[in-house]
Image (cartoon, coloured by chain):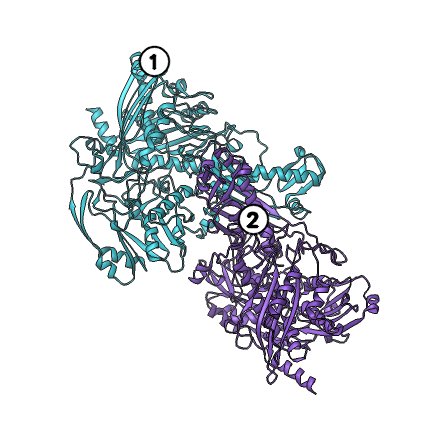
Chain colours: A cyan, B purple
Amino acid sequence: MNELKSDLSVVGKRIPKLDASLKAMGRAEYIQDIKLPGMVYGKILYSSYAHANIIKIDTSKAVALPGVHAVLTGEDIPGKMKMGFYKDNPPIKKGKVCSFRDEVAAVAAKSPEIARKALSLIEIEYEELEGIFDPEKAMKKDSPLVHEKNKTNILKLPWKLHYGDVEKAGEKAAFTVEDRFSTTWVTHCCLGTSGAVALFDANDNLTIYTNTQIPSLAQKDFLEALKAMGLENKRARVIKPVIGGGFGSKLDTYAYEHIAILLAHKCRKPVKLTFDRQEEFKATSTRQPAIIDIRQGCDKNGKLLFRDIKMILDNGAYTSWGATTPSVMMMPVTSLYRVKNVRYSAKCVYTNNTYSQAMRGYGNPQATFAIESSMDMLAEKAGIDPIEFRRINRNHPGDVTPQKFKITTCGLDLCLDTVEKELKENNIKQKGVGIGIASLIHVGGGARIYKSDGCGAILKMDDYGKVDIFTGGTDMGQGLDNITAQIVAEELGLFAEDINVVHTDTDVCPWDVGAHASRSTFVAGNAALGAAKKVKEKLLEFGSKILDADPGDLVLRDRLIFVPGDNEKKMAIDKLLRKAHFSPGGTMLMADFFYDPDNENLGKEFKGNMSMTYTFGVHGVRVKVDVETGKVEVLEYVAAHDVGRAINPLLLEGQVYGGVVMGLGYALTEEVVHKKGKNMNANFRDYKLFTAKDAIKIKAPVLETPDKDGPFGAKGIGEPGCVPTAPAIANAIYDAVGVRIYDLPITPEKVLAALKEKNN
Amino acid sequence: MNELKSDLSVVGKRIPKLDASLKAMGRAEYIQDIKLPGMVYGKILYSSYAHANIIKIDTSKAVALPGVHAVLTGEDIPGKMKMGFYKDNPPIKKGKVCSFRDEVAAVAAKSPEIARKALSLIEIEYEELEGIFDPEKAMKKDSPLVHEKNKTNILKLPWKLHYGDVEKAGEKAAFTVEDRFSTTWVTHCCLGTSGAVALFDANDNLTIYTNTQIPSLAQKDFLEALKAMGLENKRARVIKPVIGGGFGSKLDTYAYEHIAILLAHKCRKPVKLTFDRQEEFKATSTRQPAIIDIRQGCDKNGKLLFRDIKMILDNGAYTSWGATTPSVMMMPVTSLYRVKNVRYSAKCVYTNNTYSQAMRGYGNPQATFAIESSMDMLAEKAGIDPIEFRRINRNHPGDVTPQKFKITTCGLDLCLDTVEKELKENNIKQKGVGIGIASLIHVGGGARIYKSDGCGAILKMDDYGKVDIFTGGTDMGQGLDNITAQIVAEELGLFAEDINVVHTDTDVCPWDVGAHASRSTFVAGNAALGAAKKVKEKLLEFGSKILDADPGDLVLRDRLIFVPGDNEKKMAIDKLLRKAHFSPGGTMLMADFFYDPDNENLGKEFKGNMSMTYTFGVHGVRVKVDVETGKVEVLEYVAAHDVGRAINPLLLEGQVYGGVVMGLGYALTEEVVHKKGKNMNANFRDYKLFTAKDAIKIKAPVLETPDKDGPFGAKGIGEPGCVPTAPAIANAIYDAVGVRIYDLPITPEKVLAALKEKNN
């Protein structure tokens, strides 16, 4: 860590997660722990086919089963109740199913056992249709159609840009590489499975407990659902229990939530609908699989001249946020390294597979796998050391990228130096051992993908020097509560434990666009800081009167307000608060703040400074490849990031460790195996997640380049950890044994096959 | 109702309680409904004697009982953990018990049954002491002492004033009356019995669910309790479940709360401690019994010249807020009618009886019983019609009373006229039938009895034209939620159902001194109004830009913002909010406000304008007395109040009806019977509460004299309904059959005895 001189007393401290003890003691309340009086249990019946017409549904036996409170089929779903980015997904399907994940019926019963039994009593007659599971084939004219009314499987989406002139630049290039890369389905594997509890009050106002990263947008979805149900002008209150992992999986609302709402309204009882692990694997969304054709070229000095990328994305049967990941892929495509001529297009294609969703990095890992693999290949062709090649092309502070991203702070050089030093120290060339690196750019100061990128905060102080802050920001395990508490404590001269962060309830917490795009530290942090600054001003103003001092001379620190060096002018902050409260015209200190960053929506040509700042990083890895088995062992891993300022280095490192391990799984082991649309490995035995036992020692140097707009200079660091891991490993494998794997995950089988091919 | 011309659209509307359907459906969560994971159950063992030394306590058998998690005796209570106004009351007693209500041990067990069984296994050896149960006897030198260290049973309390010169005025009086009146114990009879659930987090921060009218002051008490337990700098979160009636009973913290805290800390589990009905009767506090000697005199024209009152109050064994009721009694003593020469003194005396607490009216009913009975007697002596006599002496707007109360609005004349008209209409003199009236003055604009009389409010609006407001004010069934919602809705041009009032949680709600002194409509109403005004200003400012109109021309009403008469300049408020949110530099509308009225603490001589305004009222009653049985039948009841402005006439009338019925019980039937300190009627069969079947038709004319400081002109009306009921009835009985009853309740036995004595 490049130690910054700092007179900060709380920001920068390694304070463990504030709810750690609660979790360790088993007293955190997850969705599974919610029990309400009169609550009944919902279950969903899924399709038996990847693609089929529903001829007939007979629910009569289920309805007749004692203990069953409600049974729903597609016929019960209001026509306007549709989910997802394209509103092409009703919570229960009618007429036709388009994937094994399609919901065909749901029940509520007084116990989960009865609900399960009721599902088994529902009789459905299907007429199977030919399915389509390959997006390239699905693009062909004679392909079966997933949604007939569209007349094509290709989604009408605008993901296409061309800046500069790629063709002309291509002609000038001294060296050019062109390859195809591909990635498959992986999933979030949240340890807390999905679920919701919905209930209505007597006036048809909804309360829903749900795992969500987007309480305010979920509220909007649910209000629209209520409207579709004919319930106008009602309230929808969203309460988040403790969330056992998000990683983007909770950036949309889902069928289980809408079904819980419909069942609750039908029953007039609270309905709880939670997923078991198998359901979690089968009925939640994945990272979007991508087929990526990339061409890059540089001049004879290694200067990057152009980048040309075409992608085909398997959209699955419905359109959630996965279909919008190309908008984020554009970021590394246009802005990772200096490159003036860029062309990019992406096609999303309906298939009868599962549909995709946001997942940590939101397209960035897929794109960066292709770009950074290709970069190494181009460096080799140009005869330049891959680290040096990146140094030549690195981004600089002050750059404006072709997409009009304004690079303010940029520690990419620092990261390259640090990783190089770590990797090359004691680097004795061994057989089968190699090193590889890959860089990343990611939004680090919000990301305006909605009409507002804002977050609100309300803060109140009590008579005892304690603070309650209600924030729109969501802590889903990543530690936003700590970040918020440390920022507020720093600003008000208190300790982190003096700050109580409330982020669980839309009745209490102001609006926020959601916990995505690594934006929470930056945006929610600035919202909290803004509210704290307003209260601080009042504290200083009142303190200046009481202590007879200039407000500018007063310091808040260690629960004290004082003029440094003047022992007479010092008072405990809680005492000052009581004086403010119990004086004539007394008041309590409260403040609100809404922070919406001054960033831009991408315009027509996908240009605009979508984030206030950008986070950079370089990952370096040393691997050993067993040429007999193809197995890749990670010997050393360095993940250096330019984070602006580490509000809490302990949690920041945790984010990096977690990200890297997720990236390692993406690189080496993880895959949701689908056969003709059917999930074949819906459990942790067959889905090869990196576990604690597989974890390796990761070095996570934190490089600080305080950002002028970040709270205390901080940038976002939630996602980067998993972005460049796969290409760094692919590059290291190539360095070790001279074979390149183009398709994730890099399994021993693929390595072995490549070695065989190379040796032939 | 004197119909005020009003262009208000929500204030003044008869909107049923917002939580009525929730309560009717049985879905309101009372303390009894709270269930937390791992929760165990607490029970308290009470003294077997009114006054005794504890020789020995053996808890070994209770400790050994399977399922018992903790046993506490007085030995486990930290020395500094004391309750009440004088901090003379530890939650479990050690060494000596001073009343049957004294707590001597407590247990927590996995079921209430085991807890009860455990109590029965605790063996205590007592040495009985002589008890003292009569406050007059307790004042004598040779009386047994309740607290030996005090060396007297008379509390050191300052309740004494003398304004003008009562002796000199007495010499000038043409007519004088002098009598003794007395009142006994009555109790609140909340339908929701008392209880608390306490739990600690891993860092020893406390959360307590409890029925309280004083969340902020209770929080302070609990923080002091934690400190006494050695837990410094912790947080105490107070959550109020739905409260089933307060009436002043919840204006202090009690042993059951402190015991729940101690048990929870010992167990490391949530501990629930709730009272059954018998315990509620025996172990909660009563209205303070009083012996009142009153002397009043007037000149020959009926002008009141002096009032001289001495009181003896039975304090019971410990000192809670009951001991401070004389400070409120001073209000009618000095300020009900114009009277320049006033003398007042009150002595509170320890006895081995139960101790008293605040109860609706807080001393005012006791004092007004004596004053208004005496007023009738003086009127008779002076030969003046009792209504006319009051008219002569009535308060006027602009008066400053001897205690320096500033009468701003005063509708006492209107009330007298209205009641006279009602009573004298169709008044045919019948044998055994008579009419009586009595007036009241009460604080109607807060009551500064603490360092702050303030209340905070935080308000936020969402994208849908809905409001969440967090208020310090407490709804305990009286309807403050409606009042708050109607005030905010009126100010912001919304409907009452658009406003969600959150008042349940000190983590969320700003500070408030408590729901007492009929202050909530005025103070919490002004706090809500203040926050609404700030948001309104922002709405108008933004609206003026969008609609191209002068902010001063814009009106908010019916969910619309518009320039009246200009159909072009009109927009739905929710749409405007979305525009404000989703514009560049967008924001959500939020505001906070802390309202602390400009009233005064009573000074050294008990002078000071303790309330911003005062509420007046006159009750008139027609009774029929059965001379054979002594039974009094109420034929007609008129309760006219000057309320400033009725925010919600439906709820206001409800307050009056409820108050009058409580007053009727006080007048005629209610008494907690104590024999040598022992409660003899701890159930609803023997404690004669007026029930629905006993209720009579009450007319409640609402007289509006909008007050300049009240929210939309409103004054407080929570307590007045029960203040003058007893003297109105006593006066009517005298009018009917010529006997005067000096001692409450006016039972048939007392009436019969008086009739007998009169006839002899």
Does residue A606 appear to the left or right of B199 in the view shown? left
Inter-mark Cα distance, 2 to 1: 68 Å
Q: In this rendering, which labeled residue sits more in front, label 2 or label 1?
A: 2
Q: Hey, which quadrant is residue B758 in on the image?
A: bottom right
The label on residue A256 is none
Give the position of the C terminus of chain A as an image quadrant.
top left
List x then y, in percent, for residue A324. 33, 33
**10 Å crowding of disc 1: few (<14), some (14-19), many (20+):** some
Residue type, mark 1 in image: Asp
Q: Which residue is more in the foreground, B594 or A132? A: B594
Q: Which residue is mark 1?
A: A299
In this rendering, does residue B100 appear at all? no
Q: Is residue A409 above or below residue B353?
A: above
Q: Secondary structure at mark 1?
A: loop
Whole-percent x and y of residue A700? 44, 32
Which residue, given by chain and number where applicable, does mark 2 sit on? B528
Chain to which mark 2 belongs: B
Location of residue B110 in the rendering, given as x and y in whole percent from the top left corner: 46, 65
Tag 1 subunit: A
Please state if A609 lies on the left or on the right of B129 as rendered: left
Q: Is residue B549 above or below residue B296?
A: above
- Three-letter amino acid code at the position of disc 2: Ala
Secondary structure under tag 2 reads helix
Within-10-Å neighbours for mark 2: few <14, some 14–19, many 20+: many
Question: Relative to residue A37, is residue B63 depicted above or below?
Answer: below
Say which of B670 and B711 sits in front: B711
Q: Are marks 2 and 1 in contact (CB under 8 Å)?
A: no
